Image (cartoon, grey):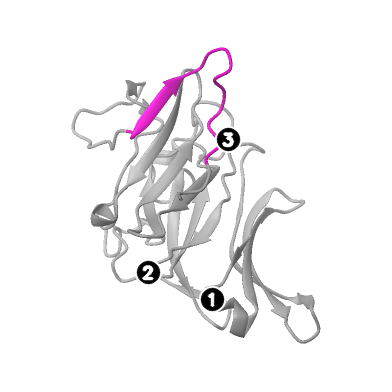
Amino acid sequence: MTFDPDFQSNGFFYVSYIDTENYSVISRFQFLHKQGIVDIESEKKLLHFEQPFNNHNGGHLAFHPIDKYLYISFGDGGSSGDPYGHAQNLGNFFGSILRINPNVNGTYSIPSDNPFIGDAPGFLPEIFLYGVRNPWRFDLDPFNGDLWIADVGQDRVEEINLLQVDSYTDGTNFGWASMEGTIRRPGYRSDVSYHEPAHEYEHGVGRCSVIGGVVV
């Protein structure tokens, strides 16, 4: 859950959840300040799509402290090894972080500087970056806008990714499932530019899945 930048005046907040039919849902609700309650009937669904498996849902969301857009993470859809090739496919939301501009009527628009606007047919312009496995948590630097992502690894490596604000329009590919951290995997292509993690660590005793936290 995250609060609209104008929450104090409009009462809007946004929730990411999985429904009982295994669909990912991004919804807006409204808190009624005078009554001190949430209007459950106020739900406006911005995004709604089915998950193929019940793991790697991602689902973190936050408003950027500077550009005020809503950033949303989704995992690769689950199972193991990204069997459908979701995270390297710009035609679906899996394995990516989205960047949208919510509208007051409960819809959204695409920021004009999103990196994949105007690309080949089938590319989804909501996608801000891709090639992540399960970005369960990310955070935004409140001072310079840099994006830090904790991406859960598979067999060997946990990684922390950094997308600096001056690279926001690059269309960054963090490599999964062609890369796990800096390790090449089946499907690796020498003609593709993969963005390497800022930090990685291998599994071992006491070193488990990366969780992520808050930039301070």
Residue designated by label 3? 78
Residue at 52 percent across and 59 percent down: it is 62
Residue 205: within the magenta?
yes
- Disc 1 is placed on an element classified as loop
Q: Residue placed farthest to the top in the image?
A: 205
Is disc 1 in contact with disc 3, using a CB cutoff of under 8 Å?
no
Kind of residue at disc 2: Asp
Circle on res. 67:
2
Residue at 37 percent across and 62 percent down: it is 125
Where is residue 101, by image quadrant?
Answer: bottom left
Magenta region, main secondary structure: loop
Mark 3 or 2, nearer chain start: 2
- Please tell me whether mark 1 or mark 2 is closer to you in this view: 2
Residue designated by label 1? 107
Kind of residue at disc 1: Thr
- Disc 3 is placed on an element classified as loop
Residue 188: within the magenta?
no
Q: Distance between the residues labelled 1 and 2?
A: 18 Å
